[in-house]
Amino acid sequence: MDEQAPPSPLSRTQRIVLLLDRSADKPWFMPAVGAFPLMDYALPFLPNQILMISLSFLKPDRWRMIGIAFVAASALGAFLAALLVQAVDMAWLNDALGGVGEFETAKAIGQSVSDYGVFALVALALLPVPPRAAVLVCAMAGIAPWLIGASVAAGRVFPVFITTYLASRAPEYLMRWSYFRSIFGFLQHRRMQT
């Protein structure tokens, strides 16, 4: 009598990888993923960089589309954040943010914006993380929201596309580690089943 053991339950990592892999080819997926960087200015704890890297890793042939979605959504999020900041009373906003204009970082960003204009925002957008504080300071300085969004888009292109490109090439390098081999092997097995 040859009994097979029941399949072991999937780990959390395996469930997430499987969900992302199954969903990534759906037509609604890229706009839905774009919601993450769009909301990044209101909810900075969202795992946008991890999501972008994971998607590029799982769908290496779509790294350009993933990059476009993240850049566009980040620019739109900056535009909407700036629009919201400029729609409310500045004194109230400064108090609500705990006197953001009094922090050293905000002063330094404000000085850079005064000296270099939106070029300072473009330079800050080149960093791996979105320039949340710079967007707020620029909006409080009265820079047009469309210009803030365009500056963020211009600055985010390079880091986002470098990240998605490198992540799309990562599977061949990461297969050297047993953890990634097991995750990728699991994914390949599941892909062949469907």
Image (tube, rainbow, N blue to C red):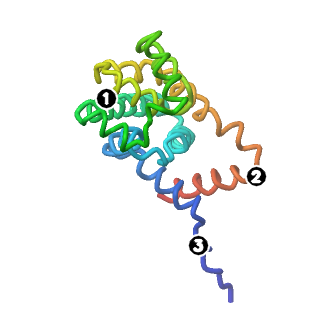
Is 104 rendered above or below residue 192? Answer: above
Label 1 vs 2, first from the N-terminus: 1
- Residue at 51% over, 56% down: 18
* Secondary structure at numbered mark 2: helix
Q: Quadrant of residue 11?
A: bottom right
The residue under label 2 is 178
Q: Quadrant of residue 182?
A: bottom right
Which residue extends farthest bottom?
1
- Residue at 49% over, 16% down: 112
Q: CA distance from mark 2 to mark 3?
A: 20 Å
Q: Position of residue 15 (x, y in %)?
A: 53, 61
The residue under label 3 is 9
Q: Amino acid at mark 2?
A: Ser
Label 3 vs 1, first from the N-terminus: 3
Label 2 vs 3, first from the N-terminus: 3
The residue under label 1 is 79
